[in-house]
């Protein structure tokens, strides 16, 4: 006798993956934000990173019932989900547009919306708006045939080409000697901590009543590059080891540069001169040459 066993195959149930639901609730905290301020932030012509940082600053100030607070770039980067340098750049741009206010190391939203200085823009990305292109006229040459246009070009060439006195050959024009291409490579700009330099300068500016910095302008950046390259060149000549960029440029402002009375406003115009004056080549050479 043969015993036969019947095996019943039970289909396995699909494994379900459960993800935790994330639901916003005012019990977890909320922000008391003026409607006018919020609507202006929504409609403001800001870049994506600028808008993120603006809302993040509101979160880090009004979210804790503060008008201003010390907010590190790393905190902004974390909440905005962008890199720290991008958060720093966007923050300084918002400060320069008066959307954010800065007092010392504290920042906060500027509730006085009339003080905001947001540049107008008629172009979004690479797409020109209709307002810009509606007055552009159609080409005036659309009625001219290709044959007529080509004949005119050929005729103009014949009229312009000079004839030699010996025949119909055109006179060879003396070719200008080509200028030798420069083989000198452009030096890349130095990398430095923008916020640290701004804070160092503003400390000096507050001490002497000079104009403060909100962002590193192109002129200031060129001056910083000029400063560090001069330092490296000076070290090569004296056999010294160059310092790292941040130590050198901040030390120059903090310990090396002392503004003259003329720069502090004792001039015919009563004008006070800021960072650009501190980074002139003449002033750099004067300070570096006086080092031991």
Image (tube, grey):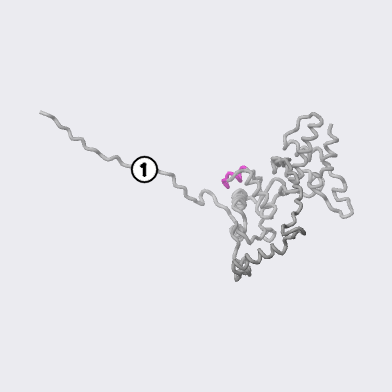
Q: Quadrant of residue 77?
A: top right
Q: Magenta residues, as a range?
A: 74-81
Residue 62 visible here:
no
The prevailing secondary structure element of the residues shown in magenta is: helix
Pointer 1 local density, CA inside 10 Å: few below 14, some 14–19, many at least 20: few
Seen from the viewer's position, the closer of residues 43 and 167 is 167
Residue 3 lies in magenta, yes or no? no
Q: Which residue is mark 1?
A: 16
> Residue 286: image x %, image y %?
85, 39
Q: Quadrant of residue 292?
A: top right
Residue 130 visible here:
yes
Residue at figure coordinates x 69%, y 63% from the top left = 158
Residue at figure coordinates x 58%, y 55% from the top left = 32
Check the image and report above or below for 171 versus 5: below
Q: Quadrant of residue 238?
A: top right
> Residue 209: image x %, image y %?
81, 48
> Residue 7: image x %, image y %?
20, 35
In-image side of 156 versus 205 (left or right): left
């Amino acid at each position: 006798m043969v015993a036969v066993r019947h095996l019943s195959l039970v289909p396995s149930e699909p494994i379900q993956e459960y993800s935790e639901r994330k639901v916003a609730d005012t019990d977890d905290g909320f922000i008391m934000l003026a409607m006018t301020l919020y609507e202006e932030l929504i409609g403001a012509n800001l870049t994506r990173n600028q808008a993120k940082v603006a809302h993040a600053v509101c979160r880090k100030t009004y979210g804790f019932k503060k008008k201003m607070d010390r907010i590190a770039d790393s905190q902004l980067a974390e909440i905005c989900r962008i890199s720290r340098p991008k958060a720093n750049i966007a923050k300084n741009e918002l400060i320069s547009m008066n959307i954010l206010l800065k007092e010392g190391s504290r920042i906060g939203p500027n509730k006085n919306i009339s003080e905001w200085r947001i540049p107008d823009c008629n172009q979004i990305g690479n797409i020109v708006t209709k307002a810009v292109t509606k007055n552009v006229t159609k080409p005036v040459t659309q009625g001219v045939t290709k044959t007529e246009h080509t004949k005119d070009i050929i005729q103009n060439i014949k009229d312009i080409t000079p004839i030699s006195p010996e025949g119909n050959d055109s006179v060879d024009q003396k070719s200008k000697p080509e200028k030798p291409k420069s083989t000198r490579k452009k030096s890349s700009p130095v990398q430095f901590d923008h916020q640290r330099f701004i804070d160092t300068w503003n400390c000096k500016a507050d001490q002497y009543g000079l104009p403060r910095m909100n962002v590193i302008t192109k002129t200031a950046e060129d001056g910083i590059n000029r400063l560090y390259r001069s330092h490296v060149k000076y070290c090569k000549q004296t056999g010294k080891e160059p310092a790292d960029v941040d130590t050198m440029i901040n030390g120059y402002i903090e310990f090396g540069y002392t503004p003259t009375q003329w720069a502090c406003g004792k001039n015919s115009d009563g004008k006070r001169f800021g960072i650009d004056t501190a980074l002139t080549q003449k002033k750099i050479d004067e300070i570096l040459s006086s080092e031991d």
